[in-house]
Image (cartoon, coloured by chain):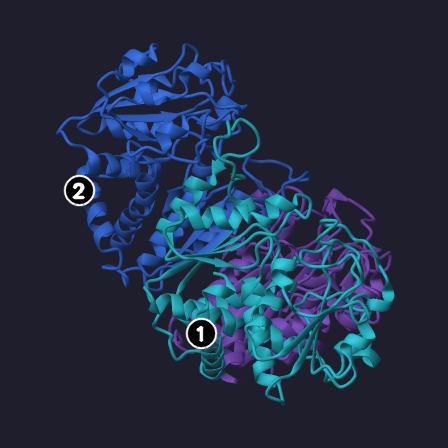
Chain colours: A blue, B cyan, C purple
Amino acid sequence: MYINDISDLNATIQEAIQLKKNPFQFANLGKHKTIVLLFFNSSLRTRLSTEKAAKNLGMNVMILNINDAWNLEFEDGTIMSMSTSEHVKEAAQVISQYADMIAIRSFPTLKDKAKDESELVLKSFLKYSSVPIINMESATAHPLQALTDAITIEELKDKSRPKVVLSWAPHPKALPQAVANSFIKIMQFSDVDLSITHPKGYELNPEIVKHTPVHYNQEQALKNADFVYVKNWSSYTNYGQVLVEDKNWMLSKEKLGAAKFMHCLPVRRNVVVEDTVLDSDHSVVIEQANNRTYAAQVVLKQLLESM
Amino acid sequence: MYINDISDLNATIQEAIQLKKNPFQFANLGKHKTIVLLFFNSSLRTRLSTEKAAKNLGMNVMILNINDAWNLEFEDGTIMSMSTSEHVKEAAQVISQYADMIAIRSFPTLKDKAKDESELVLKSFLKYSSVPIINMESATAHPLQALTDAITIEELKDKSRPKVVLSWAPHPKALPQAVANSFIKIMQFSDVDLSITHPKGYELNPEIVKHTPVHYNQEQALKNADFVYVKNWSSYTNYGQVLVEDKNWMLSKEKLGAAKFMHCLPVRRNVVVEDTVLDSDHSVVIEQANNRTYAAQVVLKQLLESM
Amino acid sequence: MYINDISDLNATIQEAIQLKKNPFQFANLGKHKTIVLLFFNSSLRTRLSTEKAAKNLGMNVMILNINDAWNLEFEDGTIMSMSTSEHVKEAAQVISQYADMIAIRSFPTLKDKAKDESELVLKSFLKYSSVPIINMESATAHPLQALTDAITIEELKDKSRPKVVLSWAPHPKALPQAVANSFIKIMQFSDVDLSITHPKGYELNPEIVKHTPVHYNQEQALKNADFVYVKNWSSYTNYGQVLVEDKNWMLSKEKLGAAKFMHCLPVRRNVVVEDTVLDSDHSVVIEQANNRTYAAQVVLKQLLESM
């Protein structure tokens, strides 16, 4: 599931907002349908909201942490005499038979750019699975988060074309670009005035950024913003590196101004953003997290209806 | 959920006994209601019985081991640049949106008395959650176990005011005082003749013990008991310490006499209590564990009815 | 649940094939019945297919990884002062009260032959549980896999009495004999021409092999086979040892000939079997894995009907 797969973004957002008003309207749509949630990595919101969404639709949910099963091999032609016990060719085909759709979370290595950009894990499941694959955050994309973000902006905007700024923020550990990538992509599809701000060296994939304006001066970039989406990511050019920990890039109440504050969570307080922002009524992160359920639910609903 | 929250203990116990007779009588009460079970620590009985209880009421159950998600921060104002990735302020508010109630297990450190007594984890969820919080054993209390114990005594007593003795027992590892605390509290609300026996140095929190008699001579204390509840706890005054491993405090068949033997489980055989006790018909620990389901179910039922 | 427990194998296989055609025909049979799946070891197929099977029958499924609970003690009379916190006597009796049946996976030590052959874990649950126990792979047996295999052969055979060969294959790690044992047992009950081939030193338990022919020359053994079931196992006589890593025993396309290739999965590609076999239409391993659901479902159905 990529953002490109959503045929009509506006209609999908409106449908999600309707589901939020009546989550159980389609409580029988998923009867006798099974979704397997497959986790290679940690999850709180994604796990709970996707499970909730599926159950709101009456689906059967089976959750598998990969470390409860076997180490998977993804390379072709390997002599599997080392640590991997099962090839994704078998795993994907087998799980497909127990599931009507499979949702997968698999983070990037942040060490091997080519491998991460190949989306080896997700693409392998797409290739070998015989049922639809849902991306619960892959190496380079987090489309259910992006859909959530678009729903949230649609709900909370008070003008037809709000100014939306994606701002980099400091973080002690190297983080993926996935959330930023997917947010940019969905905003480019949306009727918003989008711009990006980050320190030099944190340029994102130009194939994703395209003509979206990029500013190196955060303060100027944030001026008159309606929504400020804050997120750390590690360097894309010096792949996976933490180049700078310039604490000045932390979002403060002053820099936010009258705008609304967005973040995908989890967020490190007083590193990424000041307490005063998160604890103010400018922050919409909790509402945003709530919308994870309805972003997932609308996608599952559309998949169920297409079966 | 604390014992103090149960408005009418006797009515609650009778209701639990009714639920045990007909567990599926309210199988639709929890329809479209979700409980999230959040585990910071190991669990067998609590996990299975609470899940079972919720499903008996038709609820949707979502289980999250915190180590499948993120390390939570509980302190206010922290600069979160170290090992914690998410603040409980966000976590509790977010999970509240996916759940109609949240049940939490979080054991004490047994190192920092003030921190444990502040019930930081449970109280933080109580503070920031917008849905009811159920205590599945916190730093200082295990109310669902205590309610189970009261139900068990009510079912099995053969006199109106039985003699109930809580006896300390040896254990190789430092254990919390939670079970003892909650058992004492609920027995103080009940029509029983309660006393406590333990070696010197194992005095429990005086604010909990109050005027309940304490004996240092186990043999004398157990005389003519109807129910002997055996449980190890580490020292409260020398907080979290194992002071003595006096094997004589292990419960034997002789010391038990004609009384019934209770324990919350898990129990270390031939350390806490002799095989001959556990394998005799004086032991009611299996029946006691069975009642965990109905203690949880009556609490969930009351919460559902109040929604 | 052992193969010997299946009273009428042919009828059971036919019933499974019927369930596969209409998995939801008995979607209410398991209403208000609970199965607990207890995992001491890793699982992918067994976990997902057994959960799926139970839910197809409308059962409530509760899954417990033992490492989310306590270390269990299995020996009698132990002074439990070391690493084990709970005796199986209590655990089995307690879980029995939350479940209408319990399914258990517990692999062998591959170090202590007598202990493994005693099936201590499974037999302890059988002894102390008050509900039926289902074997999801024990130290010496994997009956649900064997039933799956028999269903698969019944579905795919094109002659009344096919030639079935169980062939040992190389593997870098010591593996149990459980799959081989159960496959031999169920094939001995079936109308097939069964033989076994393995290098010297890999003789299986003679009480299981009985009069089934054993060949040390793989190529000759595989001639004119209809089904070749490939599986590694460690030595039974030099218990748990990997004696030889003769790569010539890896199954190749040439050796397979016109036969169908079977394996229980997970399988190490190009160690146990060549890519060319797994990627050819001779391989039935995916269909075989699919049948895990219906093998489990027919067993659960029969258990539910007997309650």
Residue C241 position within the rendered picture, expressed as x and y whole percent measured from the top left: 82, 51
Identify the residue at horizontal 62%, vertical 89% (top origin).
B159
Identify the residue at horizontal 71%, vertical 58% (top origin).
C71
Residue C65 position within the rendered picture, expressed as x and y whole percent measured from the top left: 61, 57
- Asked whether residue C133 is in view, the answer is no
Front residue of this view, candidates C141 and B250: B250
Compared across the picture, whether C262 is left or right of A139 comes to: right
In the displayed structure, B6 sits above or below A56; it is: below
Under circle 2, the secondary element is helix
Under circle 1, the secondary element is loop
Q: Quadrant of residue A191?
A: top left
- For the residue carrying disc 1, how many other residues have a C-alpha within 10 Å: few (<14), some (14-19), or many (20+)? few
Disc 1 marks a residue whose amino acid type is Asp
- Give the residue pinned by disc 1: B8
Q: Quadrant of residue B276?
A: bottom right
Residue mark closest to the camera, 1 vs 2: 1
Figure label count: 2
- For the residue carrying disc 2, how many other residues have a C-alpha within 10 Å: few (<14), some (14-19), or many (20+)? few
Subunit ID for the residue under disc 1: B
Residue B204 position within the rendered picture, expressed as x and y whole percent measured from the top left: 69, 59
Q: Which quadrant would the C terminus of chain B be assigned to in this image?
A: bottom left
Disc 2 marks a residue whose amino acid type is Ala
The answer to whether dots 1 and 2 both sit on one chain is no
Subunit ID for the residue under disc 2: A
Residue B31 position within the rendered picture, expressed as x and y whole percent measured from the top left: 33, 67
- Give the residue pinned by disc 2: A11
Tell me whether the residue at label 1 lies in contact with that at label 2, contact meaning CB atoms closer than 8 angstroms.
no
